[in-house]
Image (cartoon, helix red, strand yellow):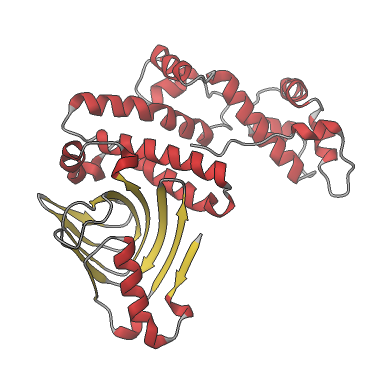
């Protein structure tokens, strides 16, 4: 992780730090502060997820301009940005997008652009065109419609979670999360592409990601089943099973595994909760059924597992099978 904080450098050096850092990250030609010199600031964190760079950026009001021509032949890339704070306007040839809190917009770094925005904070995924793997004649017409994509809420959730766990990722996990980010970016762009076939394919590709996000948000609901999930995503149960099968996912079994893993984590953290309370919190309708599934999966009962994970408790071989929650999207 790379962290830049203009407050950490001498006042006389702050403006040049902000100008150089922002223009480099956005492949811009110029950066013009719209704040008083002493009010110009930048806080930027960057993570490399193997082909995808994720930026958490807070910067004072400014105008960014990029021109394309001799001397500006940087690697083609796409910026996908989620606004957490700030308002403004983002313009590229053929379209203009209002920038506001909670909106998602894109910047095609192969084309000129102008970006006028107030004091802002954003989360951005920077993906090279080679990694994105989509033709420019498909990408460019879709960008003006990006804020209306049905996948935009999922992208916002995903990039927020990436930011939350980024500091704790190792090489393999970072690469896996980067791959998921690229898949979601492709779906986001293609879902609003004028090419109807590509739009349909993109929604198919993103369905599994959306299903996983939905399930993880509703694990505590005992009525969570294939019918509920399919209805929430406007697909048939048959189609849902088809998508899961293509990804090698056994839906009901995966839901139980997710519930057991979360329940195991909660039991390990606290002795204040009873086994029944934990079982019901994670969607099991019977404490006895929960205990049976837990022992079958991890080789110990929930109560034994809870005792083994208290401070100072001895460890046994069974704890090598500790529940782990899959953090991938």
| 282 relative to 143, above or below | above
| 117 relative to 284, above or below | below
The answer to whether one can see residue 151 in this image is no
| 193 relative to 256, above or below | below
Residue 107 image offset from top left, x and y in percent: 24, 52
Q: Left or right of 267: which side holds 6? A: left
Residue sitting farthest toward the top: 238
Q: Left or right of 5: which side holds 297? A: right
Residue 254 image offset from top left, x and y in percent: 58, 24
Give whichever of 263, 313 is nearer the camera.
313
Residue 52 image offset from top left, x and y in percent: 40, 47
Give whichever of 144, 214 is nearer the camera.
144
Q: Left or right of 33: which side holds 320? A: right
Residue sitting farthest toward the bottom: 12
| Residue at the (38%, 39%) spot, across then down | 182
| Residue at the (26%, 24%) spot, across then down | 200
Answer with the quarter of the image where residue 266 lies: top right
| Residue at the (21%, 40%) spot, across then down | 139
The answer to whether one can see residue 291 in this image is yes
Residue 9 image offset from top left, x and y in percent: 46, 81
């Amino acid at each position: 992780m790379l962290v830049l904080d203009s407050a950490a450098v001498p006042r006389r050096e702050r403006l040049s730090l902000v100008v150089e850092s922002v223009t480099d990250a956005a492949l811009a030609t110029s950066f013009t502060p719209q704040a008083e010199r002493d009010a110009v600031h930048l806080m930027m964190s960057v993570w490399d997820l193997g082909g995808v760079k994720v930026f958490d950026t807070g910067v004072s009001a400014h105008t960014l301009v990029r021109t394309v021509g001799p001397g500006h032949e940087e690697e083609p890339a796409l910026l996908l940005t989620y606004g957490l704070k700030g308002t403004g306007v983002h313009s590229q040839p053929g379209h203009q997008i209002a920038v506001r809190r909670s909106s998602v917009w894109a910047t095609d770094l192969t084309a000129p652009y102008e970006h006028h925005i107030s004091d802002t904070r954003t989360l951005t995924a920077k993906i090279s065109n080679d990694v994105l793997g989509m033709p420019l004649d498909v990408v460019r017409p879709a960008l003006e419609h990006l804020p209306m994509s049905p996948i935009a809420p999922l992208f916002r959730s995903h990039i927020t979670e990436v930011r939350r766990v980024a500091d704790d990722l190792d090489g393999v996990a970072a690469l896996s999360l980067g791959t998921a980010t690229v898949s979601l970016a492709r779906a986001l762009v293609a879902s609003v592409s004028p090419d109807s076939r590509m739009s349909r394919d993109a929604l198919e590709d993103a369905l599994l990601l959306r299903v996983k996000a939905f399930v993880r948000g509703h694990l505590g609901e005992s009525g969570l089943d294939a019918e509920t999930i399919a209805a929430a995503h406007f697909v048939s149960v048959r189609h849902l099973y088809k998508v899961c099968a293509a990804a090698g996912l056994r839906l009901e079994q995966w839901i139980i595994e997710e519930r057991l893993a979360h329940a195991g984590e909660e039991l390990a953290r606290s002795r204040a909760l009873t086994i029944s309370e934990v079982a019901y919190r994670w969607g099991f309708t019977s404490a006895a059924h929960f205990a049976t599934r837990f022992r079958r999966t991890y080789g110990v009962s929930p109560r034994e597992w809870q005792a083994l994970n208290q401070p100072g408790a001895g460890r046994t071989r069974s704890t090598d099978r500790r529940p782990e929650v899959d953090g991938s999207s």
